[in-house]
Image (cartoon, helix red, strand yellow):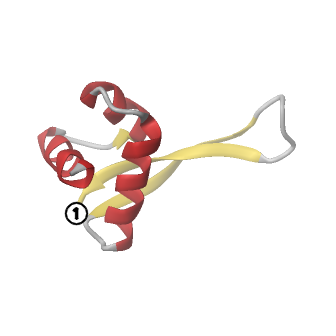
Amino acid sequence: MTQQEVYVALKKEKGWITSKELAKKMNLSSSSVTSALSKMYKWKEVKRKEVGKQKNCWSMFPSGGYKWKLR
């Protein structure tokens, strides 16, 4: 059911949105939204772009995320 809810929420969005922003708007956990988005990406229902690559103080590796949008 979550994939369908995420699809409907993305349909209402005009542009790119992060999974955290989407989860907050939908009142769901970010992990369930990220999981649904990953499955939708696998089936080519959504597009994603990488954002925010920067090093944090806890790791030597860059961290970042994705913004999502319907195809």
Q: Quadrant of residue 49?
A: bottom left
14 relative to 46, above or below: above
Q: Is residue 59 left or right of residue 2?
A: right
Q: Secondary structure at mark 1?
A: loop
The residue closer to the viewer here, 6 or 59, is 6
In which quadrant will I find the C terminus? bottom left
Residue at image position (19%, 51%) is 7
Q: Specify the farthest residue to the bottom.
A: 43
Residue holding disc 1: 71
65 relative to 37, above or below: above
Position of residue 68 measured from the top left corner of the image (x, y, whole percent)? 35, 50
Position of residue 69 measured from the top left corner of the image (x, y, whole percent)? 28, 52
The residue closer to the viewer here, 31 or 63, is 31
Residue at image position (25%, 30%) is 26
1 relative to 41, above or below: above
Q: Specify the farthest residue to the front.
A: 1
Q: Quadrant of residue 40?
A: bottom left
Position of residue 34 measured from the top left corner of the image (x, y, whole percent)? 43, 48
**Residue type, mark 1 in image:** Arg
Residue at image position (83%, 28%) is 57
